[in-house]
Amino acid sequence: QVQLVESGGGMVQAGGSLRVSCAASGSIFSINAMGWDRQAPGKQRELVAYITSGGSTNYADSVKGRFTINRDNDKNSVYLQMNSLKPEDTAVYYCNAEIKSGSYLREYWGQGTQVTVSS
């Protein structure tokens, strides 16, 4: 069984920084892309950023230049450094990863971590 566990959310003032982390555990053979989505109240879930197993990254236009995604393959972990935070970044942030476990390749999701940015 595979689990993704996020940590590091919290409350910060506008202009501040936060770092959220996500660690995958369980019966993992390999991990392809890892990423972060977010969902604000009353809004659809949206992609924030993802990183491939080779280290290529992609960001939503709304976070480019402010957020940085990276991963530690030895720790099966992905991180999102969020700088210059804005109130509109307030959301639940969900980690996701495409993981091969046994013979199966599928996407897994974490439980989410709340990020609140006050003005």
Image (tube, helix red, strand yellow):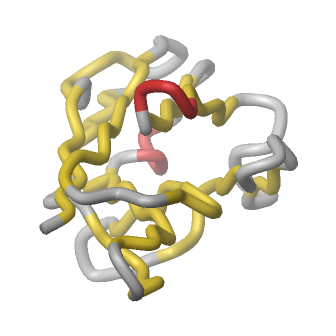
User: Residue 102 occupies which quadrant of the picture?
Assistant: bottom left
- 88 with respect to 47 (left or right): left
Quarter in which the C terminus is drawn: top left
Residue at horizontal 45%, vertical 72%? Answer: 100
Residue at horizontal 30%, vertical 29%? Answer: 118
Counting the numbered discs, the total is 0
User: Residue 76 occupies which quadrant of the picture?
Assistant: top left
- 113 with respect to 73 (left or right): left
- 35 with respect to 116 (left or right): right
Q: x, y (%) of residue 31?
A: 53, 58
- The answer to whether 49 is drawn above or below residue 107 in the figure is above
Quarter in which the N terminus is drawn: bottom left
- The answer to whether 60 is drawn above or below residue 12 in the figure is below
In the depicted view, which residue is nearer to us: 68 or 88?
68
**Which residue is situated farthest in the front direction here?**
102
**Which residue is situated farthest in the top direction here?**
16
Residue at horizontal 82%, vertical 47%? Answer: 54
Residue at horizontal 42%, vertical 27%? Answer: 75
- The answer to whether 97 is drawn above or below residue 45 in the figure is above
- The answer to whether 91 is drawn above or below residue 96 in the figure is above
Residue 44 visible to the viewer:
no
Q: x, y (%) of residue 3?
A: 18, 58
In the depicted view, which residue is nearer to us: 105 or 35?
105
Q: x, y (%) of residue 93?
A: 33, 53
Q: x, y (%) of residue 60?
A: 73, 60
Residue 43 visible to the viewer:
yes
